[in-house]
Amino acid sequence: MSWNWLGWLLWSLAIAFLWFVIHYIRVQQLMLIAKTKKRFDGKLFTRYVVLVVVAVLWLGGLITMHFMQPVDYNDHQQVWVSTKYQTLTLHNSGSKYYYVQVRRATSGKRPVVSYTYWTNNDKYTVSSRYSSVFEGSRLVPVDATSLPWNHHRLAEIDRSSGNAYAAIMTAHYRNTIKNGLGLHANHVAATYTAIKVPSTNMIVER
């Protein structure tokens, strides 16, 4: 069983507690007006503030753990990593043969939107935000050198593929209490695709 049940439980309790706080404040204010004809009481206001702060911190903590928890491929307590290797196959458009097709944006901050490549007649399209294309003697792109690659395996696929391969690294959240609190346990955390071509001549744009 994954620890996500604990996260769901805390989310349910946090939402129920927030509803209780709103209901409690409303009832207390109505009773205050009915009994004293006043709209403000110092002790009640302090109680309201404490309850609201607890509810906000509770929900804020859960939101932070779910939406704002950075993924570290090298943190073996947070994730475990698997890597799949694919040999690229040539694709053609008329007389032009290529390994990778690049789709560029017409506007925006990112000039490249996605990369498309083929392997064993299967077509793959990956976002440029989580991938890169490179060539030369390197086994991985410069922007991915910090990831935990198996360089021995990369060297093997580099030789056997003729310098044309895709290495897809996937980080999976471990089944831990911390990941469960963020509702991440046993889920995919992130994926990065490194695509190598023999030369830039084997890339086309559209």
Image: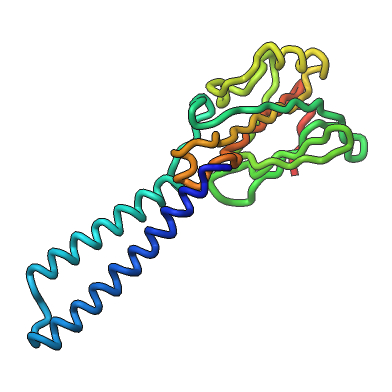
Residue in view at x 82 percent, y 19 percent: 161
Q: Position of residue 55 (x, y in %)?
A: 30, 59
Number of numbered discs: 0
Colouring rule applied to residues: rainbow
Residue 96 visible? The answer is: no
Q: Position of residue 164 (x, y in %)?
A: 78, 23
Q: Position of residue 194 (x, y in %)?
A: 67, 28
Q: Position of residue 46 (x, y in %)?
A: 13, 64
- Kindly indicate the quadrant of the structure image that contains residue 192: top right
Relative depth, front residue between 2 and 181: 2
Position of 32 relative to 139 (above/below) = below
**Relative to residue 28, is residue 73 drawn left or right?**
right
- Kindly indicate the quadrant of the structure image that contains residue 127: top right
Residue 116 visible? The answer is: yes
**Relative to residue 84, is residue 143 drawn left or right?**
left
Q: Quadrant of the C terminus?
A: top right
Residue in view at x 30 percent, y 57 percent: 56
**Relative to residue 2, is residue 113 drawn left or right?**
right
Relative depth, front residue between 77 and 165: 77
Relative depth, front residue between 17 and 83: 17
Residue in view at x 51 percent, y 25 percent: 76
Q: Quadrant of the N terminus?
A: top right
- Kindly indicate the quadrant of the structure image that contains residue 9: bottom left
Position of 90 relative to 45 (above/below) = above
Q: Residue furthest right?
A: 95
Relative depth, front residue between 16 and 62: 16
